[in-house]
């Protein structure tokens, strides 16, 4: 491996590390946790209104699954915004 190839590999590794650090920060962020709670709460409220007269345990047990699934699917938009904010803050701190 020559010097240029090694430099390219180092750059790739640094980029991957930045991505991994950002992923880790997102997974532990309060933004993510609060959004999951809020979205799950609203899904449960709406679902409860819809199935008010149903007493089936199987249908009621579907609430947490549905809430979590919908909250994680909708978190993509929130995460994109969060990542841009974190990256901007990082750039500002580096200056």
Image: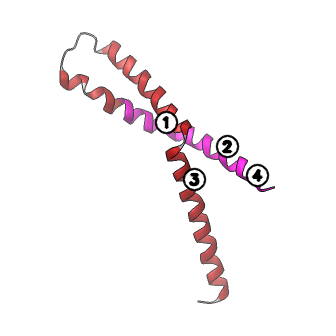
Q: Earlier in the sequence, mark 4 or mark 1?
A: 1
Please give the residue where the numbered disc 1 appears in the rendered image.
33
Relative placement, left or right, of 48 versus 14 is: left
Residue at the right extreme of this rendering: 95
Please give the residue where the numbered disc 4 appears in the rendered image.
93
Q: Earlier in the sequence, mark 4 or mark 3?
A: 3
Asked if the residues shown at circle 4 and circle 2 are in contact, with their CB atoms under 8 angstroms apart, the answer is no
Question: What is the span of residues highlighted in magenta in the rendered image?
Answer: 67-95
Asked if the residues shown at circle 4 and circle 3 are in contact, with their CB atoms under 8 angstroms apart, the answer is no
Mark linked to residue 85: 2
Whole-Å distance between the Cαs marked 4 and 1? 25 Å
Whole-Å distance between the Cαs marked 4 and 2? 12 Å
Give SS at disc 4: helix
Q: Earlier in the sequence, mark 2 or mark 1?
A: 1
Give SS at disc 3: helix
Please give the residue where the numbered disc 3 appears in the rendered image.
22
Mark linked to residue 74: none
Task: Tell me the mark number nearer the camera, choosing from 4 and 3.
Answer: 4
Q: Residues within 10 Å of mark 1 (few under 14, many from 20)?
A: few
Q: For residue 81: magenta?
A: yes
Q: Earlier in the sequence, mark 3 or mark 2?
A: 3
């Amino acid at each position: 491996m020559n010097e240029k190839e090694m430099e390219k590999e180092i750059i790739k590794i640094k980029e991957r590390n930045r991505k991994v650090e950002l992923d880790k920060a997102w997974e532990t962020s309060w933004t993510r946790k609060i959004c999951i709670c809020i979205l799950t709460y609203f899904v449960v409220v709406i679902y409860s209104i819809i199935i008010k007269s149903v007493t089936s345990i199987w249908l009621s047990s579907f609430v947490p699954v549905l809430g979590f699934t919908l909250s994680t699917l909708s978190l993509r938009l929130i995460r994109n915004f969060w990542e841009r904010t974190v990256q901007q803050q990082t750039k500002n701190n580096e200056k």
